[in-house]
Image (cartoon, rainbow, N blue to C red):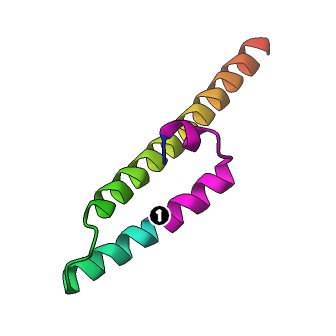
């Protein structure tokens, strides 16, 4: 999944996809531990997708915190 696709998702969709991809990665890790999986490069792709999603979630969280902080400052300056 490309970063542009991830950015276009809503917060709820992004969290759901993150959870699904994390579960898929864990399954692949367990399968690989038991016996080598057929396409090991898929683990690398899944790991990168999880990281991309987590990066976007953290960026959105940070942006929301900054917006809340700016609103608080603006309100205190008005009073």
Residue 67 lies, in percent from the top left, at 65, 27
* SS for callout 1: helix
Residue occupying the far top of the picture: 77
Q: Magenta stretch containing residue 18, yes or no? A: yes
Horizontally, residue 76 falls left or right of residue 60, namely right
Magenta stretch mostly in which secondary structure?
A: helix
Horizontally, residue 25 falls left or right of residue 19, namely left
Up-down: is 10 above or below 74?
A: below
Which corner quadrant of the image does residue 71 belong to? top right
Q: Nearer the viewer, residue 18 or 45?
A: 45
Residue 55 lies, in percent from the top left, at 44, 42
Up-down: is 54 above or below 73?
A: below
Q: How many marks?
A: 1
Horizontally, residue 45 falls left or right of residue 72, namely left
Horizontally, residue 22 falls left or right of residue 71, namely left
Q: Magenta stretch containing residue 49, yes or no? A: no
Residue 25 lies, in percent from the top left, at 37, 68
Q: Rate crowding at label 1 as few (under 14), some (14 to 19) or many (20 or more) other CA atoms within 10 Å.
A: some
Residue under the point 28% across and 74% down: 29
Location of the C terminus (image quadrant): top right
Q: Magenta segment range?
A: 3-21
Which corner quadrant of the image does residue 70 belong to? top right
Residue 14 lies, in percent from the top left, at 60, 52
Residue under the point 47% across and 64% down: 21
Residue under the point 43% across and 45% down: 52
Q: Nearer the viewer, residue 35 or 79?
A: 35
Residue occupying the far right of the picture: 79
Q: Nearer the viewer, residue 31 or 71?
A: 31
Residue occupying the far front of the picture: 38
Q: Nearer the viewer, residue 1 or 12?
A: 1
Residue at which label 1 appears: 21
């Amino acid at each position: 999944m490309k970063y542009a696709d991830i950015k276009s998702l809503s917060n709820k969709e992004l969290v759901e996809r993150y959870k699904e991809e994390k579960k898929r990665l864990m399954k692949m890790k367990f399968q690989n531990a038991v016996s080598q999986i057929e396409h090991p490069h898929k683990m690398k792709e899944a790991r990168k997708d999880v990281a991309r999603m987590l990066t976007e979630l953290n960026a959105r969280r940070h942006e929301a915190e900054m917006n809340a902080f700016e609103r608080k400052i603006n309100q205190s300056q008005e009073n």
